Image: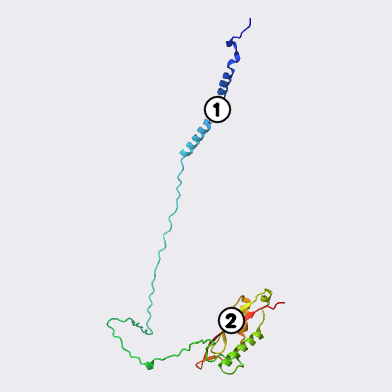
């Protein structure tokens, strides 16, 4: 005969249920313990009591007796009147108005032509080198206008060859090119208004220096009157191949 256990006597049959219930109870107690707050009521009451005493404390009123300021001194005004006799008589100047009214009569004045002075103003006339009646005469040149033109151009070439000097800085930098020079031979035969245009400032400065050394000439004439003559010439700066 086999022995059978009574299912009521099995203690471990509901162990999982008991474990779950116990775990929930412990979690609930832990949560309540963490969320529980306590306050020091005695300290708060003392602070409120001390604050009440401070608010109810009477502040004594202090009266300061300040004497009133002294009254300002009375100003005594004394007037001294001095009578001065007129020694010199002053003439009053009367300024007349320069405005013209409707009732004023305009004086009619007749001006003769002889009373007007005509001043002659000399104009600086410039005539191109190619069409002027008599070109500027370079020192040492003689002959008619065509001969003076040829001599002028020859003297200009001799002047460029004599005073030509290649700038050292331009030679070191291998700067070369053609510079066009524009200048004016004024009515006194002097060189003026020199202008240059070239590939570099060094070459332009040297070309201006050469032209500024031109001698004074006999000015060009148009209708037997000295006039200014503009002239232009190219100066070629070229380095020799070594």
Q: Nearer the viewer, residue 219 or 14?
A: 219
For the N terminus, which image quadrant? top right
Residue shown at the point (53%, 33%) measured from the top left: 43
**Foreground pick, 155 / 87:** 155
Image height of 18 relative to 86, above or below: above
Say which quarter of the image contains residue 130.
Answer: bottom right
Residue 206 pos. (x, y %)? 63, 80
Q: Which residue is mark 1?
A: 31
Cα distance between the residues tagged 2 and 1: 107 Å
In the rendered image, the residue lying farthest to the bottom is 143
* Position of residue 232 measured from the top left corner of the image (x, y, whole percent): 57, 83
Q: Residue furthest top?
A: 1
Residue position for label 2: 181
Which of the marked residues, 2 or 1, is nearer the chain's N terminus?
1
Q: Is residue 207 above or below residue 220?
A: above
Image color mode: rainbow
Q: Residues within 10 Å of mark 2 (few under 14, many from 20)?
A: some
């Amino acid at each position: 005969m086999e022995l059978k256990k009574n299912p009521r006597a099995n203690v471990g049959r509901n162990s999982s249920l008991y474990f779950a219930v116990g775990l929930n109870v412990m979690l609930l107690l832990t949560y309540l313990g963490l969320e529980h707050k306590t306050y020091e009521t005695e300290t708060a009451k003392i602070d409120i009591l001390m604050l009440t005493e401070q608010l109810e404390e009477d502040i004594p009123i202090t009266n300061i007796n300040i004497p009133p300021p002294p009254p300002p001194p009375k100003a005594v005004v004394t007037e001294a009147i001095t009578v001065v006799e007129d020694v010199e008589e002053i003439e009053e100047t009367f300024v007349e108005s320069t405005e013209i009214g409707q009732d004023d009569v305009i004086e009619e004045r007749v001006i003769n032509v002889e009373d007007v002075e005509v001043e002659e103003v000399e104009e600086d006339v410039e005539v191109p080198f190619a069409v002027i009646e008599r070109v500027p005469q370079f020192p040492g040149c003689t002959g008619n206008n065509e001969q003076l033109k040829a001599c002028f151009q020859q003297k200009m070439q001799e002047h460029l060859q004599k005073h030509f000097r290649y700038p050292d800085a331009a030679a070191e930098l291998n700067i070369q090119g053609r510079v066009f020079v524009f200048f004016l031979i004024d009515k006194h035969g002097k060189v003026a208004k020199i202008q240059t245009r070239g590939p570099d400032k060094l070459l332009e400065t040297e070309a201006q220096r050469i032209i500024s050394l031109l001698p004074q000439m006999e000015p060009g004439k148009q209708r037997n009157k000295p006039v200014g003559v503009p002239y232009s010439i190219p100066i070629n700066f070229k380095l020799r191949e070594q």
